[in-house]
Image (spheres, helix red, strand yellow):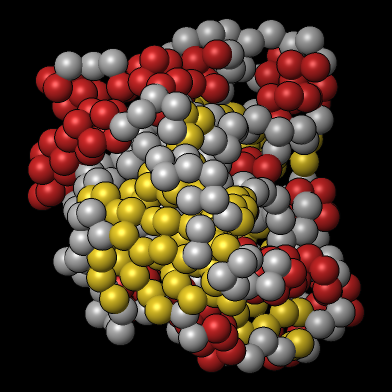
Amino acid sequence: MYFKQIVVPGMGCMSYLIGCPKAKAACVVDPKRDVQDYIDLARQNEMRITHVFETHVHADHVSGNMELKSRTGADIYYMEGSPVTFDHKEVKEGDVIELGNAKLQFMKTPGHTPHAMSILVTDRSRSEEPWLVLTGDCLFVGDVGRPDLAGAELLEEQVKNLYNSLYNKLGRLPESLEVFPAHGEGSLCGKGMSSKPSSTIGFEKRNSPVLRLSEQEFHDQLTRGFPERPKSFHHIIATNKKGPPLLERCPIVRDMSPLQVREEVDRGALILDVRDTAAFGGVHIPGSINIGLSGQTANWIGMVIDPEAELILVVPDEKAYEAMCTQLHRIGYDRIIGYLSGGIASWQEMGYPIRHLWQISAATLKEQIETGDFKHLVDVRTQAEWDAGHIREAVHYPLTELLKQAPDFPRDEEIIVTCGMGYRGNIAASFLQGQGFQHVHSLAGGMKAWNNAGYPVVPGP
């Protein structure tokens, strides 16, 4: 049997290629939208992809199932009753599909979504007993799936289903069975996943706190404190239900002159500037949002930008442009209408309006605090980060909350924004500029720079 885990860094998405080189057949489970990796691996091992299995309708990334079907002819499978409207096949509890020595048996494990499934995998060249289980978003390494994404009206039912799936179905499997989930560290489909990509049933039962609760304790814990749901999730779910469009049908991206960019912005297009914080701070186009290219880019785009927005990219080079397009397509942001040809320099050469987002050093901020020469210091980190230590004079506006409602400060007063290392601070600062705040600065290096300089912090609220 051939088995390979494919991980999308930052987003924490995990998919799988499973097959039998002897039978020259393979399947993909929970594919990402850019599917070349699977095709290359299958070819290298002389296999043809014949099946695509989805453990559930995903909320955090657009599936590559239609891409694979278009390019390989593979059939797409969901658990029976799944709310997808395109052509697909269904499996039900207990069904078995064999690809040579690879045997797949399907279990219905609802809770994260109402029609989720897990897949028991057996390598028949070694044994007739299952070797591993693909748990989808039901059981993660160090965590379990969040039950709230199906909607508040189904939360009670989902929590009950999740408890049954974890305790009475997966929990009764052999403890030696290896666990391979659909997500890991960085995903927003759970709360605190481990960076380790796999585990075992026994290890999780012994060491995951949520698997050692009474049913009432489980209910109480799983009905509160969910991570913020990005704007993109509703759009992604709808896209996955109706079938994602093929990437070749997405709008043709073109290089755009400064005049074309200006005309599109006047018509409502949004500029996404993916340069680093220093470059964006030095000069940028008014109204643009700064989300630098990093492992967590897709998650933050999902928090900040409307999925229906028409996007124009400002990038430092062609490599960054290609990388950002891949990240955008993975979460269904397909309306990329172009990029600024010649970069920000071409915009400046036309004499068009520019803005700055000046960064200040930790030493300068400390001096301003000591002299009282500042108005508002805003910390956009999470509650846990804030509680661990913050600047006494700061006010706390977690980024996810600030993006919903800008602070009620006068638009002409200075705002200094800080975060952990500067990345989220620039997202917040560029957002505030777009809301009409005229004097916004960010702390260079964020709280890491402040702490490294040895300046004081206070704990707690």
Q: Quadrant of residue 72?
A: bottom right
Residue 422 in sight from this viewpoint: yes
Q: Nearer the viewer, residue 111 or 410?
A: 111
Q: Residue at x 38, y 47 (%)?
A: 120
* Above or below for 370 versus 147: above
Indicate the position of residue 315 as horizontal and vertical percent values.
77, 68
* Above or below for 210 versus 408: above
Q: Is residue 244 left or right of residue 375?
A: left
Indicate the position of residue 54 as horizontal and vertical percent values.
38, 63
Indicate the position of residue 314 as horizontal and vertical percent values.
74, 70
Q: Nearer the viewer, residue 452 or 208?
A: 208
Q: Residue at x 54, y 22 (%)?
A: 385
Q: Is residue 245 left or right of residue 293?
A: left
Q: Nearer the viewer, residue 30 or 435?
A: 30
* Above or below for 146 versus 261: above
* Above or below for 333 versus 368: below
Q: Residue at x 37, y 51 (%)?
A: 119
All told, the count of numbered labels is 0
Q: Nearer the viewer, residue 131 or 228?
A: 131
Indicate the position of residue 359 as horizontal and vertical percent values.
77, 41
Q: Residue at x 46, y 80 (%)?
A: 74
Quadrant (top left/top right/bottom left/bottom right) for the N terminus: bottom right
Residue 266 in sight from this viewpoint: no
Quadrant (top left/top right/bottom left/bottom right) for the C terminus: top left
